[in-house]
Every structure is written in structure tokens, then in C-alpha cells.
Image (cartoon, coloured by chain):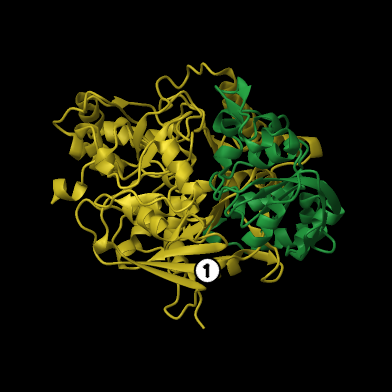
Amino acid sequence: MGQTIFDKLWDRHVITGEVGEPQLLYVDFHMIHEVTSPQAFQGLREAGRKVRRPDLTFGTTDHNVPTVDIFNISDLISKNQIDTLARNVEEFGIDAATHGSERQGIVHMVGPETGNSQPGKVIVCGDSHTATNGAFGAIAFGIGTSEVEHVFATQTLWQVKPKQMKVNFVGKPANGVYSKDFILALIAKHGVDAGVGYAVEFTGEAIAALEMEERMTICNMAIEFGSKMGLMNPDQKTYDYVAGREFAPKDMVAAIADWQTLPSDADAVYDKVITIDVSKLAPMVTWGTNPEMGIEFTETFPEIKDFNDERAYQYMDLTPGGKPSDIDLGYVFIGSCTNARLSDLQLAAEIVKGHKISDKLTAIVVPGSRPVKKAAEALGLDKIFIDAGFEWREPGCSMCLGMNPDHVPEGVHCASTSNRNFEGRQGHGARTHLCSPVMAALAAINGKFVDAREVLA
Amino acid sequence: MEKFTVYKGTTVPLMNDNIDTDQIIPKQFLKATDKTGFGKNMFFEWRYLNDGEAENPDFILNHPEYRQATILISGDNFGSGSSREHAAWAIKDYGFRAVIAGSFSDIHYNNELKNGILPIVQPLETREILAALSPDEAIEIDLPNQVIKTSKGDFTFDIDAEWKRKLVNGLDDIGITLQYEELITAYEKQRPAYWQ
């Protein structure tokens, strides 16, 4: 019987223990940020322990970072958290993309951009969007702060091997349908808890056709499908992405020879298989308060089937039977670890170029990292966005969760390229509508959602 | 971690599905650098009015008869979304010792266990029975025997044997793992040469 990529990666990392009970896994790469690490460092201090492998650990600050002037942090509690990270990495000898440095960005951008994210690794971080790194052919997942401390002290974690699901994306998408729509459609169809207890392999011809940045968008949102681990088979695009980066293997020939043994065998067995034909997909927009409450642009908001729906409609101030184009948008956010890579900004800029944003809304672009910001500025994208009336900001998590000053005002509807539309996520009373960067850019210039397929046909 | 053996407490139902960790503890409270004091801000947006100025009398945790509850009954996919352990710290600090839900997000499930909170999965029919119990009724959760005892019947539950051993004995996870030091070192020596 063949093995999945997940089986192969899992077997490579088991130090002790049997399948069906917690097994001790080795961690090859541990990313940390300022929000979920301070208590773990404090735990080490109290127990007199050290970080076992500072060389396999890498830090950055992202959640609290202001995006107008990153060094002017008016919230002193935020500033303390950022300063605490700086002190901790210094004390424990950990390399970091420090505040204001050229490498700084959202933690799930920094791993790939520095070349630390590679096929074959177990990658963890105290952040649920860590599965982003699974796009490289790695087991990557979010952990709590107690687990962060455990990795610091031991470079390992106890984990029970999850069940396995294959999500097979077939077909060729229409112009105007992107990888963000693939994952939003999967979640809308199968639910936010469909992946609970599973590691999910995203595969098929439609995944093979995607570039690395587009693949990361899908793995990023595995957690919104309920799975803490989403991953893909590495291929030449993966190797080409890693090659030449700061922490890429020096012997890439040996690395690639090994990585080529990782992809799932043709006769591998899964506990569950889902197939999605992407040629039938339309641009997605969420209407409710979790990511499964989404529809295709051409559909209408669904009937109320239980009290969860009722509450969501009440919070969003929408009614069943309405359409995405009816939503009265007041804000557009292009950013987050889901959709703020260079290719996302390029796609959005193509839409925006030569247009002005609707005068009834505020629109901001927050690049995911400083390397993305610099690359975008080298291409003149900043000027395109600014000329259209967007604000062009410094990189960080920003309005995806609003731990910094970037909030959507109460009651305002926001077209957002981020990953979560939970109540209050983007600000107290904020109403989030998840979509692709192109849908967000179109919404900005039209003042409402329009069908990307019609514009790009 | 804190021991959990046999625990008696009253219950409160909050039966929404997909309660996410953003609801359990919103972002503005994640800026602390210690683990204490999160309980007063648990379910902040639902529990308070006008940005914390006053309690929301409609929210069930604010009903006088449920204020002493230490066991939460909830819906499917409890603790979904963010990995923030602050959610588990808030649940613990508020005074809950167990959460009985239809299912749990994988990350939050581990976070509860690591803090000595017992996450228990039960089908909807059982949770509806528990939700209908008198707010005064103390139910008994017997972890060694994996059973919930109530006036309306006893309900068994599953838990991984190793997690149960750690909870019942209040063992320090890191301390246990450090006993495998030789195995970890041996593993490190055979990692691929291109990573050395």
C-alpha cells in the first residue's frame, strides 16, 4: 500500500511512540511572534530552562505593528509586547526579523521569504495560520503557548497522528476565479469543521497549475476548514521558490533529490476524499460570521436554517435572498497572510490602475512583509494604489485582526482579503466580507461587489 | 499541569456552534505578557454592553442562577479559529474546569488540556439533557472512570489514555519529554545532511 506525503513526513519525524497514541515529533523550524511567545519565555525562565535549538527558531513582530509609522506605537501595552519579543530573542540567542528590519513581515510571510520554509520539515508557530507553510510539502501547524514552551525546551511536540483527507481540485478556473475562491468554495460547501481531526492534502491539476504564492493562500486557510494541517506535494515550482533564499540548503542538489521522494504515492489511501471542479466556480463572497457562510457571486444569501444563521444575519444586518452586489461597502482591506504577497498586489493593481476608488469608502493596502513592500514599490504599484485613493501602508497583520490601530468602524461593511469574518474580528461591530484581492480591488473602484469574471472576460 | 480527577460543579449552556477563540477572548486582551486576569474579559463582546461599561443582562453567564457554574456546555467546533491559548487561560481564570461540546478545534483542545481544563465530546442529545438541568444541580465528572454523573443519567466519554494519565497525575509535560533527551539527541544526528 502506498503512502501519502503526510505519512512519509510523519514517519520521518517520529522520535518515539506508536500510531494511535501521542507520538513525539521532532520540529525542524519554529517561528515565533510577539503575541503568543512571552508567556513561553517566562515559563523557561521560571524553570531555569534554555531554548534547545535557537538555530532552528526564528522570530518576528507582526500582530501589534502600526502600519502608518511603525516606530510610533501609541498603545503602550502593544509596545511592551513588541519590546518583550526583542528582549527575549536577544536573551535566548534567537535570530529574528526585528522591528523595522528589512526581513520583517507577517510571520507566515517571513518563513517562506527567508527560505526557512522547505519541503520535508515539521514547522510550527504559535499561530493558527502556520499551515501556510504546508504549501511547501511540510507538516506545518499552529500551536498554543504551552506547546511553544515545549518546543523551546525540547524541540519536539507530542501529537496524535490525525486522519487524512485528500481534496482534489480539478479543471481550469475561469478568468476572475483565484485560489482564494477555491478554498472559500471548499469551506462554504463542506463547512468550517469538515477538516477537524484531519490533515488535509490539497492536490490535483488545478493545484499543480498554481504558483507558490497562490498555493500558500489555500494552505493558509486550512484552519478555516477545521484542519490545523494543510499541505501540498512539492514540485519544481517549490524547489525554484526555495533556491537562492537566505536559509535555503547549501546543497540544493541533495535536498531536491530527497524532496522528490516526498509526494504522495499514486496508490496512497485516505480516510476521506473530496473533489472540487474549479471550472464550475465563481468568485466567492462571504455574507456571515464564519468562513462557511459564503456564496458564489451569482447566488443569493441563503435561508435561515438555525439560530447560528439567525444570529449571523442580525450581526451583519443582511437578510436572506439578498445579493453580494447589494452590500453597502464602506471599507476595503487588501492585506493579511492570506493575500498580501506580491502577486496579490499585482493582480489588484492591474484592476485599480487608472481608476479612482468610490468616494463612499476607505481603502487600504497593507503588504504582508517589507520585502513585498519594496518589490511592489520597485514596480510602481504603490503609486497606482495611491493615485486611485488607496492608503499604502507599512507591513503587518493590520486590519485582519486589528490588534494594532487599524480597525473597521462599527457597523461598516468591509471587503477583505483576509481569512476570518468572525464577529468583531476587524473591530467592534465590524462586518467582514471575505473575497479575493481582485474582488476587493473591483469593490473599491465600484463601491460595491461586482463579478470579476465579467470584468476579466 | 493542574490535576483533574473527580470534579463536581454546576453547568451553564451556551449552545452556539463554532464558537471561535476571538469570541472567547478578543484581540484587545492578547497584549498581556502573563497568563493571569483573562477571566473577566472572557466572551467580552457578548457579556458586556458599551465596550465593557455594563453587563449584558441577556447573556446567560450574567443570569444570577448561572453565575456559579464551572462546567460549560456548548455546540460543535468549540474554540475554532485562532490558536491563542489566551482563550484557555480565560476559561480557566473565569473558573471553568470542564467544557462539554459537540466537537473541539484541534488546537484549542490541546490548549485546554495543557491548562488542566477537561474538554469532553458528547452528542447533541446528551448535551441537550445537560443543558436542561437545573442551574443548581452539581454534576460529577469522573475522569479516572470517564463518566459524567447526573440526575438524568450517566454519560461516558472518550479521552486519549496518555492525556488522561497526565491530567489525573498533574504531570509536567516538558519534564516528561526531557526524559527522552537521549532519543532526541540521537534523532538530531540523523537529520538530513543538507540541514546540518
Please identify the quarter of the rendering in which residue A85 is found.
top right
Please identify the quarter of the rendering in which residue A365 is found.
top left
Provide residue A396's location: percent of width, then percent of height: 44, 32
Left-right relation of A205 to B81: left
Q: Which chain is green?
A: B
Q: Is residue A337 above or below residue A74?
A: below
Crowding at mark 1 (Cα within 10 Å: few <14, some 14-19, many 20+): many
Left-right relation of A366 to A86: left
Provide residue A440's location: percent of width, then percent of height: 28, 39
Q: Which residue is mark 1?
A: A164
Q: Is residue A74 above or below residue A324?
A: above
Determine the residue positioned at 28% across, 43% down.
Answer: A324
Viewer-side residue, A261 vs B144: B144
State the hue of chain A.
Answer: yellow
Mark 1 residue type: Gln
Viewer-side residue, B9 vs B171: B9
Provide residue A407's location: percent of width, then percent of height: 43, 27
Left-right relation of B179 to A158: right
Q: Is residue B93 above or below residue B118?
A: above
Chain of the residue where label 1 is placed in the rendered structure = A
Q: Is residue A415 visible?
A: yes
